[in-house]
């Protein structure tokens, strides 16, 4: 989505996430109401003075709690009549500094809302608190009338804490986003007139030759001009096998070079690299506004003018009836009873408790809105390697081409040869040999051909043979025999010039993959395999898990297109992955869920991070999100029902401000009790092993 001519991109002044702004103003920009409130409370750089800021917030809350306790004593009649004026003066002394600490962010927000022509939550909070405090201060000084200091102080306390927790989570997400660029090497070894010279990555231009030494990260996207090596690309492609790169092959910045030295001609350089395009896709996905906005903010747009108008109308009506004193009481009752405590905490209180519940289960959720979206999900995308599978090969079967050779001999000779290799398939061969009790032969004169295969002299049970093993094309070049081409991951084995057999491998399914997908399906959420791996390998995994659809192979851009196409069709999506190639799709999905064993980029891009690799936490989180949405709906139903009855009673003079304040407290406690049920949400169960 491109910004219009009147829009520009900026960073949130508190958490650092990208945000779209209109006009040419140069003032501070915030991505959400939570960041705006907390930035005003604790400053834009909370890390620098976090201790003092939290202390200041704690002092304001402590004062408000004392006001509430003393007010309850007054309401209960537990204070001697002669000491009531003293208690009221104490309440005034406690309330004034509490509001001085807590209310300024809302006052500034209200001023901005009024200047912008729209009254929202800040305006209602400010009007309610100031009205309650103003009347209470006047009555305290006059020595007559009721006081409502508890209403004035507790209102900003409840809302502020919800906003503080939400914005803190966003701030962590913004900090992680800024760290993504560190995945690229800071410099490159470039060829110029003086020879090979180390230069900053920003100085490399298209067409330059860049040398990549063993173990280094590739610094550019380009084509190999010289050399031969293997590149570890699993985080980009989802393929666990390293890829052999020779002259003419394309490579991507951020991949890790193996033992060889290659010279790459740059086609894309700093600013246009694949890795940076992935980061840009992440940022763009975050810029797109969420379809789910705060219900309280939307409701307040209409509710606040209604409340103020109703208060004024009530005062004028009673004035016209010849009772201006009753009109003043009714108007104040309307403002006090309509204080948006229930509306202000209906969503953040429930989501804050739900986020805490998820954290206890080892799931980090970056903001309350995320849980609401998770609860709405009706389609799940899953990456393959490292997500539904463990990212390590396992022997699937042994096929013998020579009837004179046993499986034990084939496996024993290959195990002897692979004992000199660190290749991932070699490790799988050695593991299978140990499981079957087959002793590996003794190997010597071993030659390794990176990315293709290896050969060596292997002595097994006293017989010495020259063994060649590797890909079909590699073994075909060195041996004779009939080859039955088979898709998937295989090792062909030959000796004495003839092919003897084949070992076929497959990726190991994650222990909880089947249970995870079954639980999602039972909840009405079908699953789609979205993988960068080859189509055959992806289809094999999808078939074993009975998944609805397979989309493979897919580049990072194509993964984003798949996710956005589903969203355009009206589906509410979640994406579960762990690799760099999943990062943009994680950010573009309605909710991105990264597993704890994944790359830093994937964890940064996701709205949810599962700290373990337990896939059952995905359907558990969906169920928690649905429970949270149900509680939020109940909170709003109560809030609107309460306000409708209470406002009508207050306007008709049937509700004294004292009763209005008590009703407000009761309404808030009702919402609190309902939201607290989330804390008892049951723990998920592990799959049987």
Image (tube, rainbow, N blue to C red):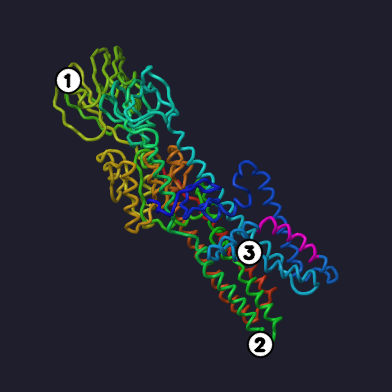
Rendered residue at 53%/65% (across/down): 118
How crowded pointer 1 is (Cα within 10 Å; few <14, some 14-19, many 20+) is rated as: some
- In the image, which disc is placed on residue 575? none
- In the image, which disc is placed on residue 479? 1
User: Residue 485 appears at what percent x and percent y?
Assistant: 18, 32
Look at discs 3 and 1 and give the one toward the viewer. 3
| 54 lies left or right of 165 | right
Q: Secondary structure at mark 1?
A: loop
Q: Earlier in the sequence, mark 3 or mark 1?
A: 3
Residue 687 shows in this picture = no
Q: Could you tell me if the residues under marks 3 and 1 are in contact, i.e. CB atoms within 8 Å?
A: no
Look at discs 1 and 2 and give the one toward the viewer. 2
- In the image, which disc is placed on residue 126? 3
Height in image: 81 above or below 268?
Answer: below
* Residue that numbered label 2 is attached to: 321
Q: Classify residue 425 by image quadrant.
A: top left
Residue span colored magenta: 87-103
User: Residue 654 appears at what percent x and percent y?
Assistant: 65, 81
């Amino acid at each position: 989505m491109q910004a219009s001519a009147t829009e520009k991109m900026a960073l949130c002044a508190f958490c650092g996430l990208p945000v779209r702004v209109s006009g040419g103003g140069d003032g501070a920009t915030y991505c959400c109401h939570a960041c705006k409130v907390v930035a005003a409370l604790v400053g834009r750089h909370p890390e620098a003075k976090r201790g003092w800021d939290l202390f200041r917030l704690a002092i304001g809350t402590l004062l408000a709690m004392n006001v509430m306790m003393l007010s309850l004593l007054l309401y209960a009649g537990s204070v001697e009549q002669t000491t009531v004026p003293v208690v009221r003066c104490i309440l005034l002394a406690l309330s004034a500094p509490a509001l001085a600490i807590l209310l300024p962010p809302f006052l500034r927000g209200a001023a901005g809302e009024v200047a912008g022509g729209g009254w929202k939550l800040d305006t209602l909070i400010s009007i309610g608190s100031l009205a309650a405090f103003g009347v209470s201060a006047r009555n305290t000084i006059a020595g007559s009338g009721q006081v409502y200091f508890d209403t004035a102080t507790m209102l900003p306390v409840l809302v502020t804490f919800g906003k503080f927790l939400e914005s803190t989570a966003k701030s962590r997400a913004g900090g992680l986003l800024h760290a993504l660029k560190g995945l690229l090497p800071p410099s490159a070894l470039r060829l110029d007139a003086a020879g090979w010279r180390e230069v900053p990555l920003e100085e490399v231009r298209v067409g330059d030759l860049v040398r990549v030494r063993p173990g280094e990260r590739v610094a550019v996207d380009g084509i190999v001009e010289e050399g031969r090596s293997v590149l570890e690309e699993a985080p980009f492609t989802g393929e666990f096998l390293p890829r052999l790169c020779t002259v003419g092959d394309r490579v991507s910045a951020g991949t890790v070079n193996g033992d060889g030295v290659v010279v790459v001609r740059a086609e894309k350089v700093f600013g246009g690299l694949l890795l940076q395009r992935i980061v840009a896709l992440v940022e763009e996905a975050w810029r797109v506004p969420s379809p789910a906005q705060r219900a309280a903010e939307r409701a307040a747009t209409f509710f606040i003018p209604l409340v103020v108008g109703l208060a004024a109308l009530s005062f004028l009506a009673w004035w016209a009836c010849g009772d201006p004193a009753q009109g003043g009481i009714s108007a104040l009752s309307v403002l006090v009873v309509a204080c948006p405590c229930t509306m202000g905490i209906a969503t953040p209180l429930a989501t804050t408790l739900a986020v805490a519940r998820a954290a206890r289960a080892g799931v980090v959720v970056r903001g309350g809105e995320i849980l609401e979206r998770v609860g709405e999900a009706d389609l799940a995308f899953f990456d393959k390697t490292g997500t539904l599978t463990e990212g390590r090969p396992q022997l699937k079967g042994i096929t013998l081409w020579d009837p004179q050779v046993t499986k034990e001999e084939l496996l024993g000779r290959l195990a002897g040869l692979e004992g000199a290799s660190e290749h991932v398939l070699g490790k799988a061969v050695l593991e299978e040999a140990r499981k079957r009790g087959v002793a590996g032969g003794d190997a010597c004169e071993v030659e390794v051909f990176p990315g293709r295969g290896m050969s060596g002299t292997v002595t097994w049970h006293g017989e010495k043979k020259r063994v060649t093993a590797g890909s079909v094309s590699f073994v075909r070049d060195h041996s004779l025999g009939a080859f039955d081409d088979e898709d998937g991951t295989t090792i062909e084995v030959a000796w004495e010039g003839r092919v003897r057999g084949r070992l076929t491998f497959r990726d190991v399914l994650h222990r909880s993959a089947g249970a995870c997908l079954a639980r999602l399906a039972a909840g009405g959420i079908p699953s789609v395999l979205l993988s960068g791996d080859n189509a055959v390998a992806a289809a094999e995994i999808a078939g074993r898990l009975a998944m609805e659809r397979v989309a493979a192979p897919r580049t990072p851009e194509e993964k984003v297109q798949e996710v956005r196409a589903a969203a355009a069709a009206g589906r509410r999506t979640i994406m579960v992955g762990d690799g760099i190639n999943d990062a943009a799709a994680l950010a573009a999905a309605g909710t991105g869920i990264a597993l704890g064993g994944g790359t830093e980029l994937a964890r940064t891009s996701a709205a949810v991070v599962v700290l373990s690799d337990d896939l059952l936490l995905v359907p558990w989180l969906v169920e928690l999100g649905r429970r949270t949405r149900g509680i939020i709906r109940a909170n709003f139903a109560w809030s609107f029902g309460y306000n409708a009855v209470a406002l009508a009673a207050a306007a008709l003079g049937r509700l004294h401000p004292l009763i209005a304040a008590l009703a407000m407290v009761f309404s808030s406690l009702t919402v609190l009790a309902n939201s607290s049920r989330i804390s008892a949400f049951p723990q998920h169960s592990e799959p049987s092993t």
